[in-house]
Amino acid sequence: MAKTLNLEDLYSRLRKENGHQHWWPGNTDDEIIIGAMLTQQASWKNVELAMDNLRRAGCLSLRKIDSMDLHDLEGCVKPSGFYRQKAARLKAFARHVYSSHGSLGRMLSGRAGTLRKELLELDGIGPETADSILLYAAGKPAFVIDAYTKRIMNRIYGLDKDIGYYELQEHITSRIRKDAGLYNDFHAQLVELGKNHCRTKPLCNMCPIIQYCRHGRKNAQR
């Protein structure tokens, strides 16, 4: 009989393989939010180039972005793609923070449900970005669903590859403890697995959990 893993066991095996990931990349809540907004339709490598530009300009904070010239901001974030759109959205987000809350800390301290609703009403913030901000900046238990998560859940457990965001989120969160620390590192472990093994063209023979993966076992039998 094929071996299977429940989700918390999957997390435990990935953590044993990779160690704690200490995610999200960023030293401050500002950096985490800026990165989350820039990474839309962009590779993290290109986001890092944009973040480095902002850092060198002394503008890697929402307060600085709020007062920054839009043209200069566009130049900084250009490596992340869609730079005019992203620059405008970053400035709009920063303006909202300070005009509505006075500080980012005050905004992030709000109740999770209220904060999520507020984030989703802002231009350019969808469920994945909102949950990234909730989890990684605000420290609230919101499990982030991204392309890696969908691909891995499809291959390991046979879930529909076109499953909706909220359906997959509910599937996962109903099967693991509601804990921001667990959500944080579990998502990071899935990203690590997706980058290194469970790629679009998977490297199944090198995968540390191939014996538990439907897709991997099927490939191995060919």
Image (cartoon, rainbow, N blue to C red):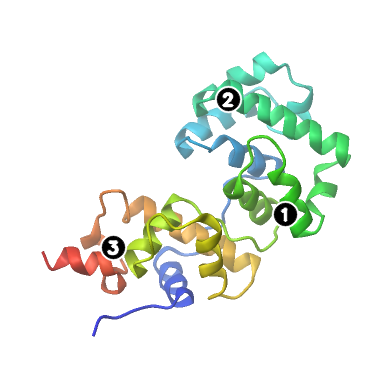
Checking the image for residue 20, the label placed there is: none
Residue 52 image point, x, y percent: 57, 29
Q: Residues within 10 Å of mark 3 (few under 14, many from 20)?
A: some
Q: Residues within 10 Å of mark 2 (few under 14, many from 20)?
A: many
- Which label's residue is closer to the chain start, 1 or 2? 2
Q: Which one is nearer the viewer's eye here, 209 or 55?
A: 209
Does residue 110 appear to the left or right of 188 in the view shown?
A: right
The kind of secondary structure element at disc 3 is: loop
Q: How crowded is mark 1: few (under 14 residues within 10 Å), some or many (20 or more)?
A: many
- Which label's residue is closer to the chain start, 3 or 2? 2
Three-letter amino acid code of the residue under disc 2: Val
Q: Quadrant of the C terminus?
A: bottom left
Q: On the image, numbered disc 1 is attached to which residue? A: 138
Figure disc tally: 3
Q: Quadrant of the N terminus?
A: bottom left
Q: On the image, numbered disc 2 is attached to which residue? A: 77
Are the residues at dot 1 and dot 3 in contact (C-beta closer than 8 Å)?
A: no
Q: On the image, numbered disc 3 is attached to which residue? A: 207
Residue 174 image point, x, y percent: 56, 74
Three-letter amino acid code of the residue under disc 1: Ala
**Residue found at the very far left of the displayed protein:** 222
Label 1 – label 3 distance at C-alpha: 33 Å
Label 3 – label 2 distance at C-alpha: 35 Å
Label 1 – label 2 distance at C-alpha: 24 Å
Q: Which one is nearer the viewer's eye here, 208 or 217?
A: 217
- Which label's residue is closer to the chain start, 1 or 3? 1
